Image (tube, rainbow, N blue to C red):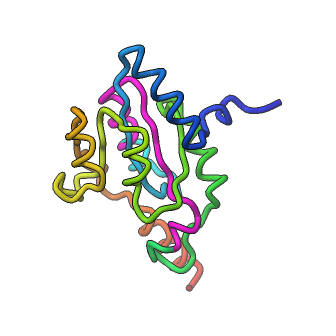
């Protein structure tokens, strides 16, 4: 029996269809993206805050290949894209999850045109990929503060240090 969260993992075409349907119902679509390699309290805080900016939260996840191209660490991603998509889809406030293999989500943002584009406060709106497209199409771009003290990179370092690596 398939899990309910599986229905929240979309191809690009499924995402476009779901999003267009939600928009025709007058729903506000919020979009964010990231690796979300080890889901931690900081991620959950950020994602839940993003979900409150509209009616539906769509999360785009980097594929394994695109995470490796980001060169965060040789071990990354620590979890496979399949694992990361299923964990993300299990969150009740996430409406849909989409994988993207490009270096940035620009193409996906232009494909689905969300109403609200959200990134962390470590970004300036002027350098958020896709911001110009969203604004040009009547949407808005927001940045959200992170919960201090949480970082996948810090967690990875703590694990490596604990094992003498």
Where residue 98 appears, as percent x and y from the top left, is: 54, 45
Quadrant of the frame with the C terminus: bottom right
Q: Residue furthest bottom?
A: 165
Relative to 99, is 7 on the left or the right? right
Q: Is residue 73 above or below residue 54?
A: below
- Residue at image location 64% in from the left, 60% down from the top: 80
Where residue 147 appears, as percent x and y from the top left, is: 31, 49
Q: Residue furthest top?
A: 25
- Residue at image location 28% in from the left, 51% down from the top: 120
Relative to 32, is 82 on the left or the right? right
Q: Quadrant of residue 1?
A: top right
Q: Quadrant of residue 128?
A: bottom left
- Residue at image location 55% in from the left, 43% down from the top: 12
- Residue at image location 60% in from the left, 42% down from the top: 11
Relative to 107, is 162 on the left or the right? right
Where residue 71 appears, as percent x and y from the top left, is: 45, 77
Q: Which residues are magenta?
A: 46-68
């Amino acid at each position: 029996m398939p899990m309910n969260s599986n229905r929240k993992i979309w191809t690009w075409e499924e995402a476009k269809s779901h999003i267009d349907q939600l928009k025709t119902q007058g729903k506000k679509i919020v979009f964010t993206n990231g690796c979300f390699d080890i889901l931690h309290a900081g991620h959950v805080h950020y994602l839940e805050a993003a979900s409150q900016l509209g009616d539906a939260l769509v999360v785009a996840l980097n594929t394994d290949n695109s995470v490796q191209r980001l060169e965060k660490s040789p071990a990354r991603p620590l979890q496979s894209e399949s694992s990361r998509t299923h964990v993300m889809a299990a969150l009740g406030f996430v409406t849909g999850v989409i994988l993207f293999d490009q270096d940035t989500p620009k193409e996906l943002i232009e494909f689905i045109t969300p109403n609200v584009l959200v990134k962390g406060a470590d970004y300036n709106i002027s350098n958020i990929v896709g911001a110009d497209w969203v604004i040009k199409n009547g949407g808005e771009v927001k940045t959200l503060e992170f919960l201090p003290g949480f970082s996948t990179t810090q967690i990875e370092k703590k694990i490596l240090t604990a094992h003498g690596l």
